[in-house]
Image: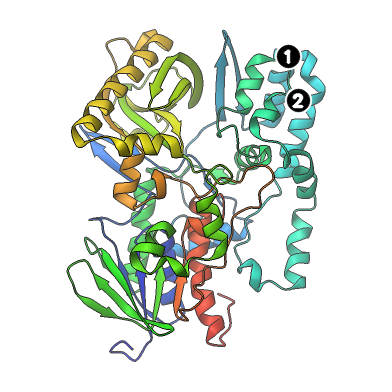
């Protein structure tokens, strides 16, 4: 118990899940304290400054910006967005170039359909079907009122009413991956586009749902970026009376019998609590903070079956460029082969952040390049010595720069490297498993990874964070914080309607 007689909730990790859990705990009358190992909160919803520029490293779109959704209400409750939030004025999801051709997935579906048919009339039937099913996928919403296992028949019926067409999407595009989706088209550039944005082994419906989030207006980009949003949520938590301890890593969750008594910090300090919510990477929780034997079987299976449940990470580089650069918001293109460890890459993407002038001095903008990576790439980076790592990072940054200039000659002499980072960066900063910035990928023929967020054998320990449900990301993180508090309320026999 805290001094005021309220039950105390300790939250490990100050990312979006931890901040969300803290706000909902305070809302329901608990005392709440967050312990974050880094000097600043935000977790993977982060950005940083270099040479007078701001590098944004999370939000490509924020699912839940449609005010008619329950997720919007959750984002509003935690202080991330509200009715007055300003969003970036972008018109497209991404573009793909291949063999001198270029096509775009516009936020306007009619425009996309017309452009793709003009590019490849022989694919008209498949293009019209794709667009039709993206419209169906616009109905997809992330359950945010309560956890699925707490939903009754009436809740499922209500949810089903709003997503009546989603079973069609799952039936048509749930049994193929993005590579196989591309193979349905005759046009080489459309083929490339279908497997550019997500790794090709992703289920195809993942691409449709992602694109539909943009076309429906439920996936806007808040101005000022990821870190600014994290700090707004942190301010809300503190205004409500919550306490944030930064540079305060947790070393161990203290377990006695079937309960946790609190946590031990890296400096040896013991902090007592009535309830503990872990909002850190589950690979770090199970094995570092508590014994691996407590890991739920669903998670064990995902960690063991690396081919079936891969993770997504990347090597990225940020550049300063002129703000009048005419490059797309996000564009994928072929490059001369780049080898990293055992893998060779022939396509990369760049994203132009000129839509947010707060990221750069006047007349300048930030451009970021990304090489999508996975488990094998992490193993390569992790095998290097410190000296080899620094050297390889510098070499790779230079190689990427050359390829960007080759594709966009107008940037010759006008592009400056600001920073680069690898899968190891995510691991070091967030303890992210294999450097992943998302949860486990759902591949064809395998069930989506999901577990309840409770720990069998420890009655008052709860789990939040993007790893509780594939594919992870910010929406899963923010609702998992709310769900963790609802689980405490249910155990106490209190209403979970929060």
**In the image: residue 321, left or right of residue 181:** left
**In the image: residue 398, left or right of residue 470:** left
Q: Residue at x 48, y 22 (%)?
A: 328
Q: Quadrant of residue 185?
A: top right
Q: Quadrant of residue 395?
A: top left
- Residue 304 position, x and y percent, is 51, 52
Q: Residue at x 75, y 56 (%)?
A: 162
The quarter of the picture where the N terminus appears is: bottom left
The quarter of the picture where the C terminus appears is: bottom right
Q: Rounded to the nearest whole Å, what is the CA distance between mark 2 and mark 1?
A: 9 Å
309 in relation to 489, above or below: above
In the picture of the structure, the residue carrying the numbered disc 2 is 127
- Residue 56 position, x and y percent, is 36, 39
332 in relation to 70, above or below: above
Q: Nearer the viewer, residue 273 or 322?
A: 273
In the picture of the structure, the residue carrying the numbered disc 1 is 120
Q: Residue at x 49, y 56 (%)?
A: 467
Look at the numbered discs 2 and 1 and tell me whether their residues touch, using CB distance below 8 Å: yes
Few, some or many C-alpha atoms within 10 Å of disc 2 (few <14, some 14-19, many ≥20)? many
N-terminal-most mark, 2 or 1: 1
Few, some or many C-alpha atoms within 10 Å of disc 1 (few <14, some 14-19, many ≥20)? some
Q: Residue at x 66, y 52 (%)?
A: 447
């Amino acid at each position: 118990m805290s001094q005021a007689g309220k039950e105390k909730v300790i939250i490990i990790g100050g990312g979006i899940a931890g901040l969300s859990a803290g706000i909902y705990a305070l809302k329901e009358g608990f005392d709440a304290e967050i312990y974050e190992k880094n000097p600043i909160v935000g977790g993977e919803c982060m950005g940083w400054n270099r040479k007078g520029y701001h590098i944004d490293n999370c939000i490509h779109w924020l699912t839940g910006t449609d005010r008619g959704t329950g997720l919007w209400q959750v984002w509003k409750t935690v202080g991330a967005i509200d009715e007055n939030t300003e969003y970036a004025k972008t018109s497209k999801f991404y573009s793909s170039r291949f063999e001198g051709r270029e096509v775009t997935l516009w936020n306007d579906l009619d425009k996309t359909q017309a452009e793709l048919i003009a590019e490849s009339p022989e694919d008209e039937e498949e293009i019209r079907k794709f667009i039709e099913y993206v419209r169906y996928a616009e109905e997809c919403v992330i359950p945010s009122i309560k956890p699925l296992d707490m939903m009754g028949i009436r809740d499922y019926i209500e949810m089903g009413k709003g997503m009546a067409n989603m079973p069609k999407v799952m039936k048509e595009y749930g049994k193929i991956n993005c590579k196989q989706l591309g193979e349905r088209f005759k046009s080489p550039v459309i083929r490339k586009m279908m497997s550019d944005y997500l790794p090709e082994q992703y289920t195809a419906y993942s691409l449709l749902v992602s694109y539909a989030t943009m076309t429906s207006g439920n996936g806007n980009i808040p101005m000022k970026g990821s870190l600014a949003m994290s700090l707004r949520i942190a301010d809300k938590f503190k205004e409500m009376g919550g306490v944030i301890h930064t540079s305060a890593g947790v070393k161990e969750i203290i377990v006695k019998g079937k309960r946790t008594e609190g946590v031990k910090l890296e400096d040896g300090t013991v902090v007592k609590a009535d309830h503990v919510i872990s909002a850190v990477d589950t690979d770090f929780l199970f094995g570092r903070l508590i014994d691996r034997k407590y890991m739920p079987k669903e998670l064990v299976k995902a960690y063991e079956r690396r081919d079936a449940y891969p993770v997504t990470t990347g090597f990225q580089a940020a550049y300063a460029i002129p703000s009048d650069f005419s490059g797309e918001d996000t564009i994928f293109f072929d490059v001369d082969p780049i080898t990293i460890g055992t893998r060779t890459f022939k396509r990369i993407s760049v994203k132009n952040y000129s839509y947010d002038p707060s990221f750069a001095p006047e007349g300048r903008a930030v451009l970021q390049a990304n090489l999508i990576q996975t488990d094998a790439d992490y193993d390569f980076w992790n095998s290097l010595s410190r000296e080899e790592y620094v050297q390889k990072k510098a070499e790779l940054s230079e190689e990427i720069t050359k390829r960007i200039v080759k594709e966009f000659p107008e940037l010759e002499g006008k592009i400056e490297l600001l920073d680069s980072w690898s899968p190891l960066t995510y691991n070091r900063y967030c303890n992210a498993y294999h450097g992943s910035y998302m949860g486990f990928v759902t591949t064809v023929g395998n069930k989506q990874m999901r577990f309840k967020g409770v720990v069998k054998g420890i009655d008052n320990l709860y789990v939040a964070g993007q790893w509780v449900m594939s594919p992870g990301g910010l929406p899963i993180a923010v609702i998992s914080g709310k769900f963790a508090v609802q689980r405490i309320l249910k155990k106490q026999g209190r209403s979970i309607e929060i």
